[in-house]
Image (cartoon, rainbow, N blue to C red):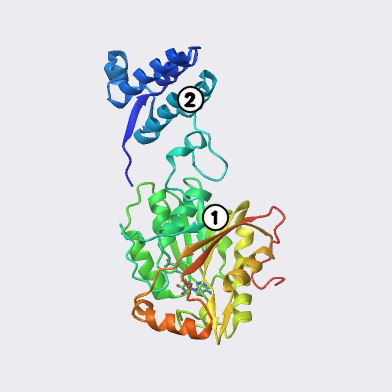
């Protein structure tokens, strides 16, 4: 969603806020705030100053109109001078400098402007993002909002992302949009080729590297791949494996969707985690997107089993997000039938999947493919 942004002269705004901060009577302070707010929101503030208008090098700051307006409202609603000054100083600090953490570009000094970043553990996404190169052509893809959230939250611009089950390249399309570099591994040659074609349709203003390699993520030589890009490690790993055999992606034995039973699937999945772990920078994040399955009257908690496989390889579980599951066209047609079956069989129809977030511990086991698993 596009927001209305106001561009202001950074130093002058900071100076004006400082001058108001010096006022020690609440009514006087409120009057000064009211006039500043009105002038800024009417677009009649620093643009009216000829000295600033002519200073082409003046450093500016962009502020979201709705957030700025709400911040003024909060200051004006304060019942004491001290409280109003507290909000005022917070705004001034946000105007003067960005305050970002080590793992993303979110400016914590202006955190209220990031209302598109989800922080709750229940995600209801009513619509898939179908914009740009995202065509949703691939059966079993995930909605682009998942990698979007993960890239914004756990990477900075210019950092590297590894998607071990690249499929149609959803993660890499988001990498292009957000100026992150991405490497994807996809077992199926033909799918990898089609993904490359789709990814190339997405504009790439930041010149991000977005490469899909055909290969088996359990044994792919990731170090050599990364070295070919001059990189030692990635800062985010994305894992969206087959949900065991719910969708058969190919006839290949190396395909996780062909594992003969749950334990074999978990073993193959563990090998992928072991293969990528040495290439993920310490203390950075790994995201698992997975759903559960149902076999012969029994709920198989694939999500939690995979979660344990990751934890056993030196990761800290940071979050389990439950996300609503898109009804597939087939399922929609059979909705009534599934409801009837659920009533008869004493179970619930799947409507959710998991987005699990892990952080690599600094002492994570550096096992390689087929290593000490
Ligand atoms: C759930 S899909 C991923 C979809 C992807 N996130 C997207 O949005 O298109 C899982 C993918 O893993 C691939 N796959 C299965 N076994 C694999 C393996 N051993 N190594 C690499 N990819 C594998 C499948 O071919 C399939 O494309």
Image quarter for residue 49? top left
- Which quadrant does the C terminus fall into? bottom right
* Residue 23 x/y as whole percent: 48, 12
187 vs 33: above or below: below
Q: Residue at x 35, y 59 (%)?
A: 129
Separation of marks 2 and 1 at Cα, in angstroms: 42 Å
Compared across the picture, whether 346 is left or right of 188 comes to: right
Q: Nearer the viewer, residue 23 or 168?
A: 23
Label 2 environment density (alpha carbons within 10 Å; few <14, some 14–19, many ≥20): some
Look at mark 2 in the image and give the residue it sits on: 78
- Is residue 177 in view from this perspective? yes
88 vs 373: above or below: above
Q: Residue at x 51, y 81 (%)?
A: 245
Look at mark 1 in the image and give the residue it sits on: 236
* Residue 10 x/y as whole percent: 41, 23
Image quarter for residue 370? bottom right
- Is residue 254 in view from this perspective? no
Q: Residue at x 39, y 31 (%)?
A: 68
Count of picture labels? 2
SS class, disc 2: loop
| Closer to viewer: mark 2 or mark 1 | 2
18 vs 298: above or below: above
């Amino acid at each position: 969603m596009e927001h209305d942004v106001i561009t202001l002269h950074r130093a002058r705004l900071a100076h004006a806020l400082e001058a108001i901060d010096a006022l020690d009577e609440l009514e006087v302070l409120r009057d000064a705030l009211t006039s500043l707010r009105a002038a800024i929101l009417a677009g009649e503030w620093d643009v009216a100053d000829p000295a600033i208008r002519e200073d082409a090098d003046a450093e500016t700051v962009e502020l979201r109109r709705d957030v700025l307006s709400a911040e003024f409202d909060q200051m004006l609603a304060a019942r004491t001078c001290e409280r109003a000054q507290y909000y005022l100083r917070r705004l001034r600090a946000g105007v003067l400098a960005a305050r970002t953490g080590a793992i993303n570009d979110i400016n914590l000094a202006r955190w209220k402007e990031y209302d598109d970043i989800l922080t709750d553990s229940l995600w209801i996404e009513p619509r898939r993002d179908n914009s740009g190169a995202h065509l949703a052509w691939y059966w079993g893809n995930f909605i682009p909002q998942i990698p979007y959230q993960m890239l914004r939250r756990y990477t900075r611009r210019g950092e590297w992302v590894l998607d071990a089950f690249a499929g149609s390249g959803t993660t890499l399309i988001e990498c292009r949009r957000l100026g992150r570099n991405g490497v994807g591994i996809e077992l199926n040659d033909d799918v990898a080729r089609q993904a490359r074609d789709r990814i190339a349709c997405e504009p790439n203003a930041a010149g991000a590297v977005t490469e899909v390699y055909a290969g088996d993520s359990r044994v792919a030589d990731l170090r050599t791949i990364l070295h070919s890009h001059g990189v030692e490690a990635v800062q985010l790993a994305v894992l969206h494996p087959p949900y065991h055999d719910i969708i058969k992606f190919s006839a290949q034995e190396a395909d996780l969707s062909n594992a003969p039973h749950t334990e074999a699937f978990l073993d193959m999945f563990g090998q992928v985690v072991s293969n990528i772990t040495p290439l993920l920078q310490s203390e950075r994040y790994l995201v698992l997107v997975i759903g559960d399955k149902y076999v012969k009257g029994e709920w198989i908690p694939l999500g939690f089993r995979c979660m344990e496989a990751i934890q056993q390889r030196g990761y800290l579980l940071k979050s389990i997000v439950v996300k609503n599951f898109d009804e597939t066209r087939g399922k929609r047609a059979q909705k009534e039938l599934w409801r009837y079956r659920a009533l008869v069989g004493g179970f619930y129809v799947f409507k959710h999947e998991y987005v699990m977030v892990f952080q690599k511990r600094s002492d994570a086991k550096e096992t390689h493919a087929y290593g000490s698993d």
